[in-house]
Image: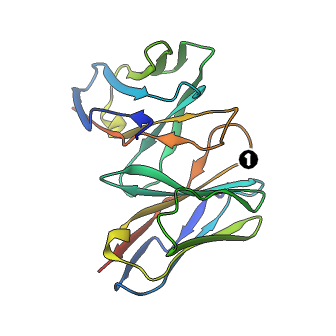
């Protein structure tokens, strides 16, 4: 079974550049979550979607961050322009029903 | 501001002994709790969960205890094994409210051979 697939696994970019992180959900799942992990704040929920519709984006840090779900199986998280404080591990997770969510392996972002 | 707190950033135990990881929460609306385990360079994976209608749930070497009056839960691992060394995240959800899983900051468990 294919799990949640994230790309790129690692990205190093210069401050001011646009970053796009990608996520493919587990087949049949209909909820999508973007989390960010940092030492200071742990795992923070940025945004989540149900059936392609954004439900809660209150965790998105600022307007530089945007997320889309153009179809039922795919999502992007974009940072434009990127800043060094955006350096973190970004996790995508999906869910079909119940409370358990399934995480991808993460995208490690470094902004220099 | 943190609704789910794991106050111990790290824990070290000997192989074969019990590991006890603790978690406190502040939101009384939380009614379902989960533990996730995370190895380096991997995503968190689901370990065990408990509903607020129960006070204990057991799965092999892993047991989660819930004390609703104290807003406290704990994960017990008996016996601990070196392969259990990982970061453990506690998470909570208000099933009747938002669908968001709220996570603690994690506790890094090291099991020494």
Per the image, label 1 sits on a secondary structure element best described as loop
Q: Quadrant location of residue A97? A: top right
Q: In the figure, is residue B9 to the left or right of A79?
A: left
**Residue at 52% over, 56% down:** A59
| Image coordinates for residue B4, horizontal then vertical, percent | 43, 35
**Residue at 39% over, 28% down:** B23
Would you place residue B22 above or below residue B4 in this image? above
Q: In the figure, is residue A107 to the left or right of B80?
A: right
| Image coordinates for residue A20, horizontal then vertical, percent | 53, 78
Q: In which quarter of the image is the C terminus of chain B?
A: top left
| Image coordinates for residue A89, horizontal then vertical, percent | 41, 62
Q: Quadrant of the N terminus of chain B?
A: top left
| Image coordinates for residue B70, horizontal then vertical, percent | 43, 15
Frontmost residue, A87 versus A105: A87
**Residue at 65% over, 58% down:** A2
The answer for which chain carries disc 1 is: A
Frontmost residue, A104 versus A47: A47
Residue at image mark 1: A96
Would you place residue B107 above or below residue B50 in this image? below
- How many numbered circles does the render carry? 1
Residue B111 makes an appearance in the image: no
Q: In the figure, is residue A103 to the left or right of A99?
A: left
**Residue at 48% over, 85% down:** A18
Q: Which colour scheme is used?
A: rainbow
Q: In the figure, is residue B14 to the left or right of A79?
A: left
- Other residues around mark 1 within 10 Å, as few (<14) / some (14–19) / many (≥20): some
Frontmost residue, B42 versus A108: A108
Residue A19 makes an appearance in the image: yes
């Amino acid at each position: 079974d294919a799990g949640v697939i994230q790309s790129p696994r690692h990205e190093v970019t210069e401050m001011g550049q646009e970053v796009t992180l990608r996520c493919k959900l587990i087949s049949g799942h209909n909820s999508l979550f973007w989390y960010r992990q940092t030492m200071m704040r742990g795992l923070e929920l940025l945004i989540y979607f149900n059936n392609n519709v954004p439900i809660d984006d209150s965790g998105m840090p600022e307007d530089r961050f945007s997320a889309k779900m153009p179809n039922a199986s795919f999502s992007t998280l974009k940072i434009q322009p990127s800043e060094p404080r955006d350096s973190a591990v970004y996790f995508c997770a999906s869910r079909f029903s119940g409370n358990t969510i399934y995480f991808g392996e993460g995208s490690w972002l470094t902004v220099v | 501001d943190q609704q789910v707190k794991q106050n111990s950033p790290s824990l070290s135990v000997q192989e074969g002994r019990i590991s006890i990881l603790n978690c406190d929460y502040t939101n009384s609306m939380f009614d379902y709790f989960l533990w996730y385990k995370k190895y380096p360079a991997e995503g968190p994976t689901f370990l065990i969960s408990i509903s607020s209608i129960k006070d204990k749930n057991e799965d092999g070497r892993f047991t989660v205890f819930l004390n609703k009056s104290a807003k406290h839960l704990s994960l017990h691992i008996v016996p601990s094994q070196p392969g259990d060394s990982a970061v453990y995240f506690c998470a909570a959800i208000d099933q009747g409210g938002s669908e968001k899983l709220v996570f603690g900051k994690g506790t890094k468990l090291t099991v020494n051979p």
